[in-house]
Every structure is written in structure tokens, then in C-alpha cells.
Amino acid sequence: MLIEFRVANFRSFRDEQTLSLVASNRDSKLPDNTFQAGKDLKLLKAAAIYGANASGKSNLLKALAFMDQFVELSATRMNQGDKIEGVEPFRLDPETKRKPSSFKIVFACDEDTRFEYGFSATQERVHDESLVAYTSDKPARSFERQFNPLTQTTHWSFKGELEREGDLLREKTRDNGLVLSQGAQLNVPLLSKVFRWFKEKFYTYDLSQPPFALWYETAQRLEEDRSFYERLMPLFRDADLGIDGIRVEKKKTSLPKELLDLLGDRGREVFGKEQPAVLAVHRVQEATDEVFDFQQHESNGTQRFFALAGPWVGALDNGSVVVVDELECSMHPNLVRKLVEFFQSQRNNQKGAQLIFATQDATQMNLGLLRRDQLWIVEKDGKGASSCYSLYDFEKKPRNTEALQKNYLAGRYGGVPTFGPLFENLESEEK
């Protein structure tokens, strides 16, 4: 369960910004959009992020994605001396350009234990890293590392159950790697527990790109899990896509051996074996079916719906956090709304699954769908630095009766483009 995420000096974010999924205690609207995570903590099931093009909303999601990927891969996919790909400081300020980017996340694995984990890094090395465990609201720092750029030395501190493992963790952790990741490789119980949350409960997706990986993930699970198929089919039938059934068949790749060799071991592993072919069944007459190749004949929106359906249902089953950039890509606004409603419904979401999505679809800015504390705005200042805030924290917070979509597009809450004379002075001509 994600409680809070903080990022600083990353891409367009210069100063530290906070995305919180803690529900306001003073807002009683849409109670099904929240859930209890312990005695005194109420969390949101979803958060929608709005902003003009180039405002930084995708950078906020990229920060979440980078943190997740670096935790999962730093111990297994990197060697000493490799650059940390994906780290990029705020480059419009000479001071921040030379400083590390920082990331911090607060989450709960269960109702009794919460963690605050964070690190800072440049492309060359990890500068700081720490883990604090909260049990019964009492914080206990488990470990901390701090790099001193003046002396080029690192101070290490391990406490509690990590104290016995301190020497080994210090020895095995590379300058460009994380203690958390290395500890999981060494099967250190506490660090393995935190690592598994990132690996099994935290997923990030960008629907602006062709979702090939999601496509194959959904297709493979459809083929292997009959109960998953039975859960997925009502989504397709009731989404008005004209699909009455789905079949998954295996087919050999059509890529020539020479191209597979150029792709290397990973390419041969993925494309050198039989791949799932998804077929969409359309009912023509009462007893007649027509079968179409999903990727060749179905629309982009339908394909993205199929790719997303697997992670969507999986998150609800497992109580995972799902982060999606451009959720509305190629899909009708009414269908997007139903997906969000489906995710937030009490019946479907019983395990505390959470959705964070960035969108340009202002029709979802509706107080019948999302609360004010679920609606976030990202915008840039005159120096190119992004900031984020929820409508509930807005200086003049909107009333629950306001027409949010209309006021947002009119610029009342920020996060919309400010046009120059070339566009601002355009006038419609009636002919």
C-alpha cells in the first residue's frame, strides 16, 4: 500500500515534491474511493495527475518507474563502473545540475509495519540510502549510508536485525548499487521483505508506447489460467468492443535466424520460441463465429484495453500499486471512466489495490468519480521547475459543487497551457 512518494532534483523537478495517497479526514465524499490501512490511516484507491504538455506529469511517473527498476535491477543487471541509467538532475540550474537526484517512498506491507525507504544518486554512484521501519508508530532506522564527496568516503550504519549483516552488506554493495537490492540477493529477511514489495506489489506502465510486454503477459496468463479467462471475458463483453470470445494459440516467430542472432540472447529467448497469437471471436449470427487476429484487425484502443486488462485484474487480485502514464491513450473517455470506477468499486477492490495515472482527459475530472484529494495538478514555473499539488490542497480549494472540468480548462486551478500571441490571437471566422 503506497502512502507517499517524494522526489527532488529529477528531470523537471528541482525542489522536493510530494505525491500523497493519504485520504483527507475532512472529506467524506465517495467513501468507496478510500480504504483503511491500519487503525489511524485511510488511503486513496486512485490518484489522477493532470497538467499541460511538458508540465512534468510524465516525469513524476518516470521518477516512480526509475525507483522501482533501480531497486529491482541494480544488484543483478549492473556491474561495477556501469552508469546508472535513468538518473537525470534538474539541468536548468547550475547548482542542481551537479547534485544527485533523490527518491523516497513510504509504504505498508501490512497493517502493522510501514517502511520509509529512499536513496539519492548520480549516474556515477549512489550517494545516500536509508531504510526506516515503523512498528506501532515507533520509527527504527534499519540502515543508512552517506557519501561524502569531499573525502570520497561513505559512512555506513546498520542497526537492529541488520547489525549482524552489516559487514557483509558493506562489502558486497557496489558504489552504483543499492544495499536493499544486494540484501535481497543475500536473502537478508528484512531487506527481502521490502524488495518483494517493489517486485510483487509495484508496477509502472507507459501506454504512450506500444504495450508489447503487457500484451504477451495478458495473453500468456489467459492461456495458462482458466479462472483468469473467466474473470477477463466479462470485461470485454461489457466494454462494448464487439468481442464475444478470445482464443490464444501458439505460433512460431517469423523472424529470420540472422535477425535473432543480432538481437542476442535476450532476443532469442523472447522471439526465438513460440509466441501467443490472440484471436478475437465476433458473433455474426446466432450460431456463427468469425475469428480475427487481434493485433492485425482490432483497433489500437481495443489492443491497449486487452494489454491493460491483465495487470488491472492482477492488481485487484494481489492488492498491488499500478502506475499508468497516458491511461486514456486510444480509448474512449467513457471506457476510461468505467475502468477507474471498476478499480475503485468496493466489490472488485477488496485488497487495497491502488491506481496512479496521468491523463489529459479532462472528462475524468469529475467529483462523481474522484474526490478533490485524488485530483493532482503538475505545472512548471517561470524557471522550468515542476511542482505538484492536489485540488484539496489548492489555496482556494474548489467546492464539492463546482464544475471542475470547466474551471480546470479555464485555467482556474493551473496546469493548462499558456499560449503566446500566435495562438492566443487566433479568431474563429464564421462563414
Image (cartoon, grey):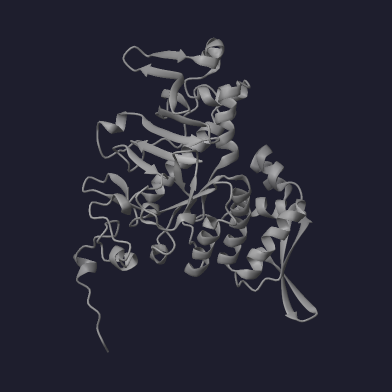
23 versus 334 height, above or below:
above
Give the left or right position of residue 47, taking residue 391 as reference.
Answer: right
Horizontal and vertical percent position of residue 66: 47, 38
Looking at the image, the residue that sits furthest to the right is: 287
In this orientation, which residue lies closer to the viewer: 39 or 301? 39
Residue displayed at 29% across by 61% down: 399
45, above or below 234, in the image: above
Q: Percent from the top left, x then y, of residue 149?
A: 34, 17
Visible residue check, residue 253: no
Compare residues 295 and 184 and report the one nearer the observer. 184
Position of residue 152 relative to residue 268, above or below, is: above
Residue 138 percent coordinates (x, y): 44, 24
Where is residue 51, by image quadrant? bottom left
x then y, percent, for residue 225: 75, 52
Residue at image point 39% right, 43% down: 20
Q: Residue furthest front?
A: 39
> Left or right: 385 with respect to 29?
left
